[in-house]
Image: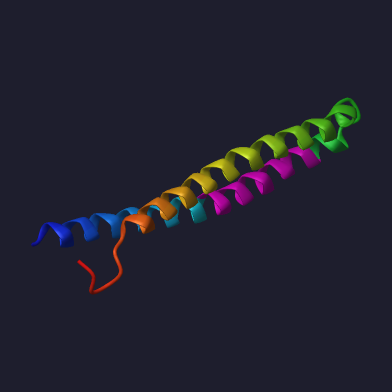
Amino acid sequence: MKPAHNLDWWLGAADLVAVGVTEGASHIGQVHLAIADHSFNVLARVPVTRPVSEPVRVIHHGISRCCYGAVAQSGRLCQWLVRLQRKPPGSQ
């Protein structure tokens, strides 16, 4: 196996992982928020927790979106960097 082909293999593997990280972060973030909503909906029904449940939900969802969004953006950045390194087919 030529070194260039070896590099192409690793770049392809890195690209695949970056896509997985990007898509995975988006989907896992959606699931996380959906699960959290179940708990927050219960808290919203309890009179003693009702006044604070919605502000805490807003803060929680904001932080979660920021974190999962940062992971997804990191994946996109890795994809971009990997694709900068790849050469078009037929070039040497």
At 90% across and 28% down in the image, what residue appears? 51
In this rendering, would 26 be left or right of 20? right
At 71% across and 39% down in the image, what residue appears? 61
In this rendering, would 71 be left or right of 50? left
The image shows residue 47 at horizontal and vertical percentages of: 91, 30
Q: In which quarter of the image is residue 53?
A: top right
Residue span colored magenta: 25-41
Task: Please tell me which residue lies in front, 3 or 31.
Answer: 3
Task: Please tell me which residue lies in front, 69 or 56.
Answer: 69
Q: Is the magenta stretch mostly helix, strand or loop?
A: helix
The image shows residue 63 at horizontal and vertical percentages of: 67, 35
Q: On the rendered image, what quadrant is the N terminus found in?
A: bottom left
In the displayed orientation, state which residue is furthest to the bottom: 90
Q: Quadrant of residue 7?
A: bottom left
Q: In which quarter of the image is residue 42?
A: top right
Q: In the rendered view, would you say 67 is above or below 90?
A: above
In the displayed orientation, state which residue is furthest to the front: 92
In this rendering, would 19 be left or right of 3? right
The image shows residue 54 at horizontal and vertical percentages of: 84, 35
At 30% across and 69% down in the image, what residue appears? 88
Q: Is residue 47 magenta?
A: no
Task: Please tell me which residue lies in front, 14 or 30.
Answer: 14
Q: In the rendered view, would you say 63 is above or below 19?
A: above
At 71% across and 34% down in the image, what residue appears? 60
In the displayed orientation, state which residue is furthest to the top: 48
Q: Is residue 40 magenta?
A: yes
Q: Number of marks in the image? A: 0
Q: On the rendered image, what quadrant is the C terminus found in?
A: bottom left
Task: Please tell me which residue lies in front, 55 or 8.
Answer: 8
